[in-house]
Image (cartoon, rainbow, N blue to C red):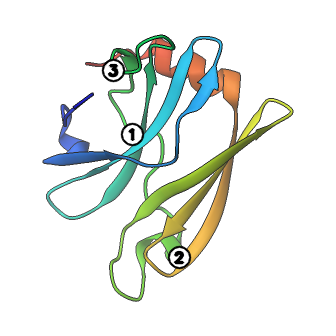
């Protein structure tokens, strides 16, 4: 096991979401946490390039949470955002994520900004 839940927004379980993205500063891993109200949120961590079992840094706070109607209201499970894949193009990380088991959406962020954010907020 690489990491376990450490913050209240993660509840009693966390899990890898989209496959890790290689950066100059480590493997960027998006992961989900599920709190006691069954709300799925997204965090990020950096893993060592040579030994991905070592966590370099991890966000203490989530970086995404259900906000839009299609993320909060679903056919089966409400309040879910769950990254399933990501692509880097021209320095932009495109995060494809499922929404409340009903829709698929796209979020974007500059890869270097997200990595800097993870490193600036090093959690457990």
**Secondary structure under badge 2?**
helix
What's the residue at 18%, 31% (across, down)? Answer: 6
Residue 81 x/y as whole percent: 45, 61
Classify mark 2: residues with Cα within 10 Å, few (<14), some (14-19) or many (20+).
Answer: many
Check residue 53 in the rendering and tell me which mark sits there, or answer none: 3
Q: Is residue 31 left or right of residue 118?
A: left
Q: Position of residue 20 (x, y in %)?
A: 53, 35
Residue underneath mark 1 = 62
Find disc 2 in the rendering and name its residue: 70
Mark 1 in CB contact with mark 2 (< 8 angstroms): no
In terms of secondary structure, where does tag 1 sit?
loop
- Position of residue 33 relative to residue 38, above or below, is above
| C-alpha span from label 1 to label 3 | 21 Å
Looking at marks 3 and 2 on the same chain, the residue that comes earlier in the sequence is marked by 3
Taking the spot 43% from the left edge, 53% from the top edge, the residue there is 65
Element marked by disc 3: loop
Mark count: 3
């Amino acid at each position: 096991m690489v990491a376990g839940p450490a913050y209240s927004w993660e509840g009693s379980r966390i899990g890898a979401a989209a496959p890790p993205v290689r950066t100059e500063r480590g493997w960027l891993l998006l992961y989900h946490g599920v709190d006691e109200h069954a709300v799925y949120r997204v965090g990020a961590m950096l893993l060592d390039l040579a030994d991905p079992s070592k966590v370099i840094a991890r966000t203490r706070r989530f970086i995404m949470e259900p906000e839009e109607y299609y993320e909060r209201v679903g056919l089966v499970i409400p309040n879910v955002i769950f990254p399933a894949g990501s692509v880097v193009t021209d320095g932009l990380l495109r995060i494809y994520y499922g929404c409340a088991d009903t829709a698929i959406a796209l979020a974007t962020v500059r890869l270097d900004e997200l990595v800097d954010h993870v490193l600036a907020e090093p959690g457990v």
